[in-house]
Image (spheres, grey):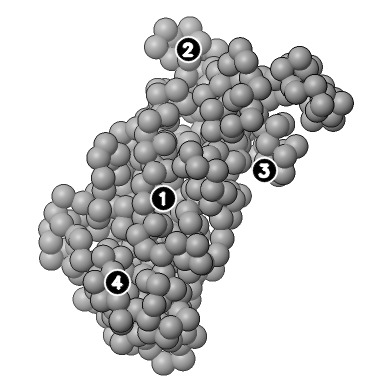
């Protein structure tokens, strides 16, 4: 698509607000400000900035320190940084991407129910931006919404996407299905605010690694209106919790059926003693022909999530008549892939399904990827 600057956008009537939002104006701050209770309460005129008189009298002595750019007002990012909830991306991305690091989507003050937004300051496409929603891993028991932010900034820096990195309650706080409910709530927040932020609510993709891959796959196969998932990327996510231990190869690092395994902690007890809940938490049980396209990537030598999980998941999608692309990574483990063709395949997949541009990546027949295989032999990518 033709690249255009912000000046051209401003002179097009339907895109003026969009240009202002992505330029980091008060309009975007106002749209986000509602998710920080104090900022919203203090911002009496709702313009997305705090002047000195709007700050509580007892805190005005800190005004100049918080106003980092010395422009006489405090914007939301400066406020979040001052209260320990903001993070400024490292240069040079800061020049091309605007980040709001701590958005409360849950409305209950829970620090896990937050997301970060990364938006290009100078988009390179016309119209609202498609959104890539990134979900962190950590065995459902670690990580937070900031852990995918650095990678997300790179995606937003292309100027072709807005990115949201979402958090969710961990298994130590709440068991399944709390994690799915939180991800759905985050998606609903993005959907409901899309028009004000210059996002396209009809072009949303989800992407995650490990536990995040599991949640991305679950959102794809168990979508909930009004949010529509256009595409999903599942990096080595569990897809059938009851089968994980039986599928483990030699030299595994975890007993998935043990009471203290990540899967059992997610279930609230040994996974095999919670078969109904485990089936409810397994994407393989919900595939059908109406699911959005899913890209599944998995290292053949993964010692945490069995490679066979993705084999069976892809087979199930194909048997149901759903769209799926499978990329096995030869000699690859649990992530850490070094082959640039993997990232290129993900970019091609997202471009095709979110921008209707280019050809999607060519996948591998899961039947040909099953069983032992030597590194470098046909049927997959090298790490």
Instruction: Find the residue positioned furthest to the front.
Output: 58
Taking the spot 43% from the left edge, 83% from the top edge, the residue there is: 259
Q: Position of residue 251 (x, y in %)?
A: 46, 91
Q: Earlier in the sequence, mark 4 or mark 1?
A: 1
Q: Identify the residue under disc 1.
A: 182
Res 273 seen here: yes
Q: Earlier in the sequence, mark 2 or mark 1?
A: 2
In this rendering, the label closer to the viewer, 2 or 1:
1
Label annotation for residue 304: none
User: Circle 1 sits in a helix, a strand or a loop, which is it?
Assistant: helix
Q: Distance between the Cα atoms at labels 3 and 4?
A: 35 Å
Label annotation for residue 278: 4
**46 lies above or below 267:** above
Image quarter of residue 185: top left
Q: Distance between the Cα atoms at labels 4 and 1?
A: 18 Å
User: Circle 3 sits in a helix, a strand or a loop, which is it?
Assistant: loop
Q: Identify the residue under disc 2.
A: 16
**143 lies above or below 227:** below
The front one of 73 and 161 is 73
The front one of 372 and 228 is 228
Q: Identify the residue under disc 3.
A: 85
Q: Position of residue 77 (x, y in %)?
A: 67, 32
Q: Earlier in the sequence, mark 2 or mark 3?
A: 2
Q: Distance between the Cα atoms at labels 1 and 3?
A: 20 Å
User: Circle 4 sits in a helix, a strand or a loop, which is it?
Assistant: helix
Q: Earlier in the sequence, mark 1 or mark 3?
A: 3
The front one of 262 and 27 is 262
Q: Position of residue 291 (x, y in %)?
A: 21, 51
């Amino acid at each position: 698509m033709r690249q255009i600057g912000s000046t051209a956008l401003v002179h097009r009537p339907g895109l003026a607000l969009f240009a202002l939002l992505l330029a980091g104006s008060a309009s975007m701050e106002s749209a986000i400000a509602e998710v920080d209770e104090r900022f919203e309460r203090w911002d009496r005129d709702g313009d997305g900035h705090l002047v000195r008189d709007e700050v509580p009298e007892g805190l005005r002595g800190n005004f100049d320190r918080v106003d980092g750019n010395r422009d006489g007002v405090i914007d939301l990012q400066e406020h979040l940084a001052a209260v320990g909830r903001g993070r400024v991306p490292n240069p040079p991305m800061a020049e091309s991407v605007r980040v709001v690091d701590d958005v409360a989507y849950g409305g209950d003050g829970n620090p896990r129910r937050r997301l970060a937004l990364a938006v290009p300051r100078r988009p390179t496409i016309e119209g609202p931006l498609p959104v890539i929603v990134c979900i962190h891993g950590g065995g459902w028991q670690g990580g937070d919404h900031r852990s995918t932010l650095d990678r997300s900034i790179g995606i937003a820096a292309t100027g072709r996407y807005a990115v949201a990195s979402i958090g969710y309650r961990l298994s130590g706080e709440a068991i399944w299905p709390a994690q799915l409910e939180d991800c759905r709530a985050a998606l609903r927040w993005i959907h409901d605010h899309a028009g004000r932020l210059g996002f396209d609510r009809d072009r949303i993709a989800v992407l995650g690694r490990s536990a995040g891959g599991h949640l991305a796959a679950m959102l794809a196969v168990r979508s909930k209106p009004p949010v529509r998932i256009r595409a999903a990327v599942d990096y080595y996510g569990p897809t059938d919790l009851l089968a994980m231990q039986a599928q483990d190869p030699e030299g595994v690092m975890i007993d998935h059926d043990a009471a203290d395994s990540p899967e059992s902690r997610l279930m609230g007890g040994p996974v095999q003693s919670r078969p109904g809940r485990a089936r409810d938490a397994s994407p393989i049980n919900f595939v059908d022909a109406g699911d959005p396209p899913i890209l599944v990537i998995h290292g053949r030598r993964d010692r945490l999530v069995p490679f066979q999980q993705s084999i069976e998941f892809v087979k199930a999608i194909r048997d149901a008549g759903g769209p799926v692309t499978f990329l096995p990574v030869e000699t690859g483990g649990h992530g850490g892939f070094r082959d640039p063709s993997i990232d290129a395949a993900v970019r091609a997949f997202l471009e095709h399904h979110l921008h209707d541009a280019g050809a999607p990546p060519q996948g591998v027949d899961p039947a040909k990827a099953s069983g032992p295989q030597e590194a470098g032999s046909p049927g997959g990518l090298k790490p």
